[in-house]
Image: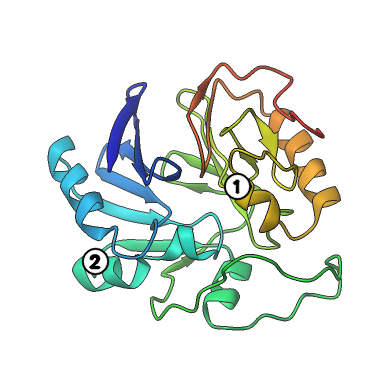
Amino acid sequence: MKIQQHGPHLWQLTWLTAFNCFLVQEADGLTLIDAGLPNSIGGILKTARKIGQPITRVALTHAHGDHVGSLDQIYVRLPEVELAMSPRTAAFLRGEMDLLPDEPQAPLKGSFMRRQAKPGRLLIAGEKFGSLRVLAAPGHSPDQVAYFDERDGTLIAGDAWQTIGGLAVAGVRRWLFPFPAAATWHLPTAVATARALRDANPGRLAVGHGAVLEKPGPGGGGGGG
């Protein structure tokens, strides 16, 4: 596992050179964004100890297995944390895989995982979770949300983009790392999400796969945005 700090509030944890989750520093502790691959719990807890603050919140971007793999282990080890996710993510984690009538009726893709951990809070786009503003970000999956840190303009975008092999919207294949494209549910929705998210004018872009980008600029929809 590799650990990198970006700015005063963000730590990037990377496994197998390509799979990220993030710790965001708050006044009362750390918010873990996504639960990583299965059996990532040791590295997550080690990083929190290194930072010197407890993990007090966990927030998910979406229900794919590389983002919720260690969720139940975290739930057991840290039973007091506030676990938050979108209502759609909660449904997928319960194994409810039907699309809603107002969603594009495209086949679901990616490794959705059932998990036993129950959310203490269901997040709605526009509200805040700690210092993070919740933003709707469907396309890669129907349930995806992003988190915007209003203190410094960091956008934690899940798999709305990837940065391995060049910045690309989810669903646009980069041959160096084609897996996010293969796991994307609905490309037109993903492109629309990328356009909406870049309107937030992020000063830093953190994604599920690849390097964190500083000052990504207005062209952040790369490869289809």
Q: Secondary structure at mark 2?
A: loop
What is the crowding at mark 2: few (fewer than 14 residues within 10 Å), some, or many (at least 20)? Answer: few
Q: Residue at x 49, y 79 (%)?
A: 114
Q: Nearer the viewer, residue 34 or 121?
A: 34
Q: Residue at x 27, y 70 (%)?
A: 73
Q: For the C terminus, which image quadrant?
A: top right
Question: For the point 51% across and 44% down, which residue is it?
Answer: 208
Q: Please, what secondary structure does the residue beneath circle 1 have?
A: loop
Crowding at label 1, few (<14), some or many (≥20) Cα neighbours within 10 Å? many
Quadrant housing residue 167: top right
Q: Position of residue 188 (x, y in %)?
A: 86, 49
Amino acid at the residue labelled 2: Glu
For marks 2 and 1, the one nearer the N-term is 2
Q: CA distance from mark 2 to mark 1?
A: 28 Å
**Which picture quadrant has residue 151?**
top left
Residue 195 drawn above or below residue 70: above
How many numbered marks are there?
A: 2
Image-quadrant location for residue 51? top left
Q: Residue furthest front?
A: 175
Q: Residue at x 52, y 76 (%)?
A: 93
Q: Say what amino acid the circle numbered 1 marks.
A: Asp
Q: Which mark is residue 147?
A: none
- Residue 159 got which mark? 1
Q: Which residue is mark 2?
A: 80
Q: Is residue 18 left or right of residue 88?
A: left
Percent position of residue 19, x then y: 44, 47
Q: Position of residue 121 (x, y in %)?
A: 46, 65
| Left or right, residue 57 beside residue 154 | left
